[in-house]
Amino acid sequence: MLRNGVDDAAQRESLIEQIRAKGVRDERVLDAIRQTPRHLFVPESHRQYAYLDHALPIGEGQTISQPSLVAQMTQILELTGNENVLEIGTGSGYQTAILRRLSMRLTTIERFPRLTLQAYRNLQSLNLPPITFVMGDGTCGFPPYAPYDCILVTAGAPPKIPQPLLDQLSPNGGKLLLPLGSREYQLLTRVTKHGTRIRAKTFGECMFVPLIGKYGWQPDEVEPWRRQSR
């Protein structure tokens, strides 16, 4: 498909090869990336960069993650298509679209009203199966649809994992994936729950915008860091 003289399909294939080179081998994940036009989730001012493997700003101090990181995080969840999934941090909806193609049920939470509305519009254009949108504090999870087989957090959490997310995770091998650490530096961490036993595994360094909420970073802890980062 040509968009302003640009072949989106060819760009997506080039992006897929870059993602493969970074270790993503799950063909279902790669196909979900292939089917999802990233330029729809990027502001008009940055659409020329939509198929580069870079994070891009989407407003409200938030970003759309680089595609290879989206693919890596999705691969780590090991989705089979039968899962009940909770996403914390809808953003513009790109990761949401990937998750919905690979799961049975998806709930996504975003704290910014403008981003929630924009993501809803973006995702409606793809004719995906139903998605439950929640506007609120993602660190509290969403108890009505718990337990979740997988929970994906797309913002940097403090060293202590938000307890509500652990509580809402399925005890039958439920997986919680989140960036865990300081405001400036995190380790991508997968927590697996078996009964009352929790097992953690890390997958390398990363840096995400802070997870703000009752069980995350507080606004007064984050604002000085944001001013220094500009």
Image (tube, rainbow, N blue to C red):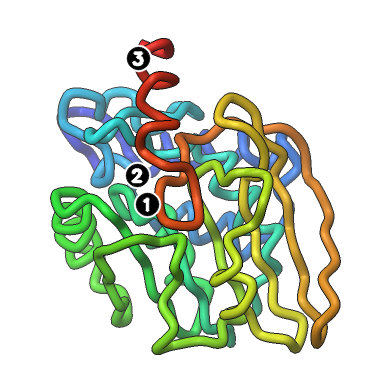
The image shows residue 94, relative to residue 27, as above or below, that is above
- The label on residue 38 is 2
Residue 62: in sight, yes or no? yes
As rendered, which of 95 and 8 lies closer to the eye? 95
Where residue 222 appears, as percent x and y from the top left, is 42, 30
Q: At 77% across and 37% down in the image, what residue appears? A: 204
- The label on residue 42 is none
Q: Nearer the N terminus, badge 3 or badge 1?
A: 1
Determine whether label 1 and label 2 are within 8 Å by CB.
Answer: yes
Cα distance in 3D space between marks 3 and 1: 27 Å
Q: At 39% across and 75% down in the image, what residue appears? A: 107
Dot 1 corresponds to which residue?
Answer: 94
Which dot, 3 or 1, sits closer to the camera? 3
Determine whether label 3 and label 1 are within 8 Å by CB.
Answer: no
Q: Nearer the N terminus, badge 3 or badge 2?
A: 2
Q: At 35% across and 56% down in the image, what residue appears? A: 90
